[in-house]
């Protein structure tokens, strides 16, 4: 066989590797959410703990995280300690999504309650308006109540460093 | 405590795999038989350790040990025991463990059944398999450990297995598929061993042929099971979607098919040596690439598993080492491969070359179609998707060309085979096939379809040509009956597989062109016509399953006035995840499937209902089953058993002359 031809497969593979490497830095699940740059949708839902009716105007007036969670969600349990730590740094508003009151309250009692407010959304109405696909999801909302970032899945050190931190720096 | 045993066994297997990768290779290079001899015991030990590890994880599922994160994420107190078993490979970490276990299993098989192969050779083969194992086990231990625990607050219940995967089809599909994927590592290891040793004659082809065939057979069955699962579980009634995950299994299958055929040439005639080596490397490399594509999240797919770029980087690094390394070794060594012997323009060699050419082109086009969205995205072209129209436009004509060659190939003789008499029976069979093919669509209801005419002609031609070859060869031995046993099993396997392809093509052509399909609004008491049947919805009920609640409709299917069958499709809502799944009711038959699936509730007790008649759809999987069966039959060939003795005799002669 030709001396040069035998190197061809390796060459083709090398080119593919280049593309794969580039491909890894692209995120296929990154859905350009229609809500980025939009204010949080209007809502009137009770607070899980106090029963007080909450609305959009009562959200914090500084950048905060809106965390969609449920007691049936295992990953929510995994990210919970991290959110608890984060809550010392910035307010975290909970959106208890498609859950029952008792289960949600028990969960908070057992694992601790770092949330500034706890929107109770058993039917998932606000979740629907937010375009939530499942729990957990976390939105970064700025001081004007505009959604800046959407994170599907667990919030952890890496997500904070790569996504939340840079966005916080740009909006502050 | 028990999960730690599994974790420990996994770490042990990792250590053993490092030894397996290093010792025999060192022994070979320094000519120390003692080191070479460690290969077999180490392969067995690795198999044992991984079996323990796998068993422990399965125990975790059966015993509801939710302190293990993987169990908590993929199981539930209400999940039936058989799905708890299959849940072991229902997600990323567990399916990797299954992958590693099967790789170890193939290593054990090589260790046990390679007595006919010189010790230094089997040591090299096991060493190469050990290297692959090191990579996979490191990947598991460092990025995807299934034994990670949630302590001290273990959840009281789990998140449940993805309802899509709660299906009998999924109990068998991944193990079969992995047997195929990973089985290709044996042919790869043999190719690498021959490249390392520089012994580049055709002996390695002889040794690796049965391994390749059996891996190919598993891969065939695995893909067919996956397609069957998609057909009745995804609720769309399709059988192939050209999804990246499906393509990731089809590409190695195409290359493995080419490899099987080219190994035959290399073994029998000593030709295509360099090409066969490349195919062996490519087949396994493409299996690995498929794993990378599916596991790294580089491509999106309906089989959306958890993605993680860190894992992607790890697998990519692993791919670079394995594929890059093997291709470099190939490039260095293969230029020295001699290609003795020649063959005529029309000969069995030339037909097999044609086969290889077509299969390679098919594999490359599927690969390009699969990667195209990634390539475009990488150069900043945005997100695009390549759909079935591309794949069908490319794949269908290529298949047609390939199949027409398949009619001639088996009849041709080695070296030179241009005697027209050999192919005379094909003229008659072609005329018969064309006539039947042209008439066939007009027998069916509805519009005349040229596609059906061509497809049926092709399928029939292949079937009859295979039959002609069968009659000729069996005839050589004096007719059917007692003398049948004298035909090589490899031949029988080939006939089965080729005939299976004809059956499958017929099924595909019929389903794609003649499916009758209607979406309707139906309530209790409504009757609709479906083919020759009347379908009446007689009841709607709510059913409580073990871990789901279902809306269930009852349909009575009438043939004229008589009740033919009662079926109950369901729309299930799984409790833990809230996911909604469609359970279609399928009445399978020899010539057609009746397919009834519930869509959405439309209010007032009415439902959107999907009714289909799918002609000959089961022939697709029956054909694939025949192909797989052909593979299994051919490895029972006498010569693979006899070889052990011959090989020893040969070795003795070699030893004497050396």
Image (cartoon, coloured by chain):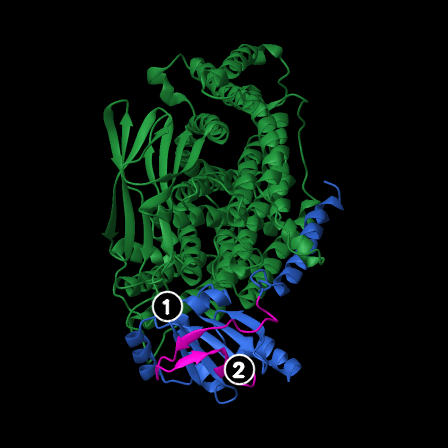
What residue did someone put label 1 on?
A: A98
Chain A visual colour: blue
Residue A171, quarter of picture: bottom right
Chain where mark 2 sits: A
Q: Is residue B612 magenta?
A: no
Q: Main secondary structure of the magenta part?
A: loop
**A4 with respect to B55 (left or right):** right
Query: Which residue range is magenta in the image?
Result: A35-64
Q: Which quadrant holds the N terminus of chain B?
A: bottom left
Q: Secondary structure at mark 1?
A: loop
Farthest bottom residue in view: A88
Q: Secondary structure at mark 2?
A: strand
Chain B visual colour: green
Q: Is residue A62 above or below residue B268?
A: below
Instruction: Tell me if residue B334 can be seen.
Output: yes
Q: Position of residue B505 (x, y in %)?
A: 49, 28
Give me the disc on residue A64: 2
């Amino acid at each position: 066989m030709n001396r040069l031809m035998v190197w061809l497969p390796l060459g083709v593979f090398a080119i593919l590797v280049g593309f794969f490497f580039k491909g890894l830095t692209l995120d296929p699940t990154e859905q350009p959410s229609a809500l980025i740059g939009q204010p949080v949708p209007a809502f009137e839902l009770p607070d899980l703990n106090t029963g007080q009716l909450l609305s959009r105007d009562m959200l914090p007036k500084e950048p905060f995280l809106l965390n969609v969670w449920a007691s049936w969600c295992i990953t929510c349990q995994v990210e919970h300690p991290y959110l608890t730590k984060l809550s010392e740094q910035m307010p975290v508003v909970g959106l208890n999504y498609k859950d029952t009151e008792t289960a949600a309250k028990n969960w908070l009692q057992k694992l601790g309650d770092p949330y500034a407010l706890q929107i109770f959304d058993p039917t998932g109405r606000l979740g629907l308006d937010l375009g939530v696909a499942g729990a957990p999801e976390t939105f970064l909302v700025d001081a004007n109540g505009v959604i800046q970032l959407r994170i599907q899945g667990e919030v952890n050190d890496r997500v904070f460093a790569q996504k939340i931190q840079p966005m916080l720096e740009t909006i502050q | 405590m028990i999960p730690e045993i599994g974790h420990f066994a996994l770490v042990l297997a990792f250590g053993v795999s490092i030894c397996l990768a290093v010792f025999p290779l060192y022994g070979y290079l320094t000519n120390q038989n003692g080191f070479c001899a460690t290969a077999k015991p180490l392969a067995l030990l690795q198999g044992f350790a991984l079996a323990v590890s796998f068993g422990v994880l399965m125990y975790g599922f059966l015993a509801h040990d939710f302190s293990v994160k993987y169990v908590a994420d993929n199981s539930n107190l209400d999940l039936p025991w058989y799905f708890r078993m299959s849940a072991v490979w229902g997600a990323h970490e567990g399916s990797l463990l299954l992958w590693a276990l099967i790789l170890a299993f193939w290593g054990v098989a090589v260790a046990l059944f390679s007595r006919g192969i010189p010790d230094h050779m089997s040591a090299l083969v096991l060493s190469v398999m050990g290297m692959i194992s090191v990579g996979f086990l490191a990947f598991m231990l460092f990025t995807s450990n299934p034994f990670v625990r949630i302590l001290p607050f273990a959840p009281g219940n789990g998140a449940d297995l993805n309802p899509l995967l709660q299906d009998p089809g999924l109990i068998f599909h991944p193990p079969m598929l992995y047997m195929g994927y990973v089985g290709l590592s044996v042919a790869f290891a043999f190719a690498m061993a021959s490249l390392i040793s520089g012994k580049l004659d055709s002996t390695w082809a002889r040794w690796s042929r049965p391994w390749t065939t059996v891996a190919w057979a598993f891969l065939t069955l695995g893909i067919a099971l996956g397609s069957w699962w998609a057909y009745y579980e995804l609720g769309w009634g399709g059988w192939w979607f050209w999804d990246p995950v499906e393509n990731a299994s089809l590409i190695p299958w195409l290359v493995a098919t080419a490899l099987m055929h080219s190994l035959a040439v290399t073994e029998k005639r000593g030709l295509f040596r360099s090409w066969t080596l490349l195919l062996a490397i490519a087949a396994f490399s493409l299996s690995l690439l498929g794993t990378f594509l599916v596991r790294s999240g580089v491509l999106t797919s309906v089989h959306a598993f958890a993605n993680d770029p860190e894992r992607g980087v790890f697998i990519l690094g692993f791919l670079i080492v394995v594929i890059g390394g093997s291709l470099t070794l190939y490039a260095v060594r293969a230029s020295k491969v001699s290609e003795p012997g020649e063959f005529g323009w029309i000969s069995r060699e030339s037909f097999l070359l044609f086969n290889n050419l077509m299969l390679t082109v098919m594999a490359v086009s599927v690969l390009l179609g699969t990667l195209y969205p990634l390539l475009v995205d990488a150069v900043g072209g945005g997100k695009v998707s390549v759909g079935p129209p591309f794949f069908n436009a490319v794949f269908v004509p290529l298949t047609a060309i390939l199949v027409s060659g398949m009619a001639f190939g088996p009849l041709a003789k080695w070296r030179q085979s241009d005697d027209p008499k050999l192919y005379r029976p094909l003229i008659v069979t072609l005329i018969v096939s064309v006539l039947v093919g042209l008439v066939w669509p007009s027998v069916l209801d509805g519009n005349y379809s040229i596609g059906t005419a061509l497809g049926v002609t092709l399928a029939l031609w292949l079937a009859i040509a295979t039959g002609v070859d069968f009659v000729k060869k069996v005839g050589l031995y004096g007719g059917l009956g007692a003398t049948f046993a004298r035909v090589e099993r490899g031949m029988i396997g080939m006939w089965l597989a080729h005939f299976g392809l004809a059956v499958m093509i017929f099924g595909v052509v019929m389903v794609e062109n003649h499916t009758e399909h209607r979406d309707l609004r139906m309530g209790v008491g409504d009757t609709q016509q479906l083919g020759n049947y009347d379908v009446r919805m007689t009841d709607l009920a709510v059913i409580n399953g073990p871990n789901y609640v279902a809306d269930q409709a009852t349909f009575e299917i009438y043939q004229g006035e008589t009740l033919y069958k009662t079926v109950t499709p369901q729309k299930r809502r799984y409790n833990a995840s809230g996911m909604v799944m469609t359970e279609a009711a399928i009445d399978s038959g020899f010539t057609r499937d009746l397919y009834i699936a519930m869509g959405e509730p439309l209010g007032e007790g009415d439902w959107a209902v999907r009714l289909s008649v799918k002609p000959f759809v089961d022939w697709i999987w029956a054909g694939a089953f025949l192909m797989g069966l052909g593979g299994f039959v051919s490895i029972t060939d006498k010569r693979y058993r006899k070889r052990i003795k011959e090989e020893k005799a040969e070795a003795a002669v070699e030893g004497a002359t050396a």
